[in-house]
Amino acid sequence: MDLVLGLSMTASSIRWVLVDDATGAESRTVDRGTVPVDPAFSAETLVGALLDRPVHALGLTWTSDAERIASAVWQALTDRAVENVIAVSDVEAAEALACGIADLAGLERVVVCVAEPGASVIAAVTPDGVTADRVDPSTLADVDGLDPDAVFVVGSGDVAGVVAAVEERLEVPVVTAAEAELALARGAALASGSAVSILDAEAAPKRRRLSPTATLVSVLAAAVVTFVVSLSVAVGMSLTPDDPAPQMARAVTEPTVERVAPPKPATAAPRAPEPEAPPPPPAAPPAAEPVAVELPVPAA
């Protein structure tokens, strides 16, 4: 089985999820856990414990205040020569998650609030596109100006408090899901598996599109399970969230083709002269006429 590992890092904790069959329709959680970031935290020890079994891919996401932790984990992975590590910032993850939820729900205007201690993100999908911004956790519920059709709340922070605050301000569905704090970690795992599969030129099965009439709770649960396959082609390999993500290599110029003038029509070769008729054979000599010759008569 192909195992993929996802880590979601904040300044206070690291949540991780180990998933089996990341590109399948029924991705299964094999293991999960939380590690506090305290003075005794060691990135080398964490990576050594998590990689006690081989993984096909590893996804990392982090909040803006956890860049030091993310750098330490990245270095520990580099020291172990771990391959297929995919990194994505919290803003990119929130944007992709919002797009995935909007697609699953069939909604044009969706807001996703990622509640994390010390750093939060609001992502909004509108007919004009998707945007995401880091905000102070105290302002996470200020989404009424975005005019959403529904609001989804995930993260490891005060999810219940954000849900209650949004419900007081808006009359639209406000939805969360069980284990919402693992959404980004699981998403990072699935995104890394999908990215590696694309790079390996393996066709990933398409997700089943839910009907717009499906309940929003089911939509969010599906989004938490499948996250966003589109994230696999948008992930960045740089640890600095503001740095542009590298693009997959692609041809930017077409090979120059030298134009060749079309060949001139071939001129017909002159016809060979017809052979002259052989001269008539010489006339046969006239037949000799018989001549009478008198022979002497011998004596008796």
Image: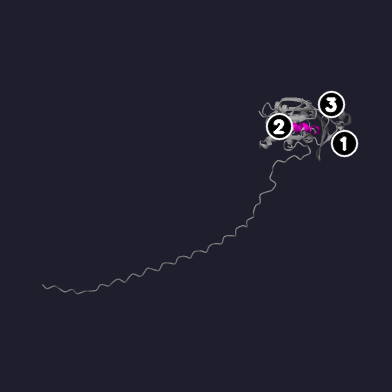
- For the point 77% across and 28% down, the residue is 14
Please tell me whether mark 2 sits on a helix, a strand or a loop: helix
Q: Image quarter for residue 264?
A: bottom right
Quarter in which the N terminus is drawn: top right
Please tell me whether mark 1 sits on a helix, a strand or a loop: helix
Q: Position of residue 263 (x, y in %)?
A: 60, 58
Look at label 3 and name its amino acid.
Ala
Q: How many residues crowd mark 3 within 10 Å: few (<14), some (14–19), many (20+)?
A: few
Q: Which residue is mark 2?
A: 77
Q: Which residue is mark 3?
A: 160
- For the residues carrying marks 1 and 3, which lies nearer the camera in this image? 3
> What secondary structure do most residues of the magenta stretch adopt?
helix
Q: Which residue is mark 1?
A: 145
Does residue 76 belong to the magenta stretch? yes
Magenta stretch bounds: 64-78
Taking depth in this image into account, of 293 and 214 the one nearest to the observer is: 214
CB atoms at circles 1 and 2 under 8 Å apart? no
Between the residue at mark 1 and the residue at mark 2, the CA separation in whole angstroms equals 42 Å
Q: Image quarter for residue 83?
A: top right
**Up-down: is 17 above or below 237?**
above
Q: Position of residue 2 (x, y in %)?
A: 67, 29
Q: Give me the disc on residue 98.
A: none
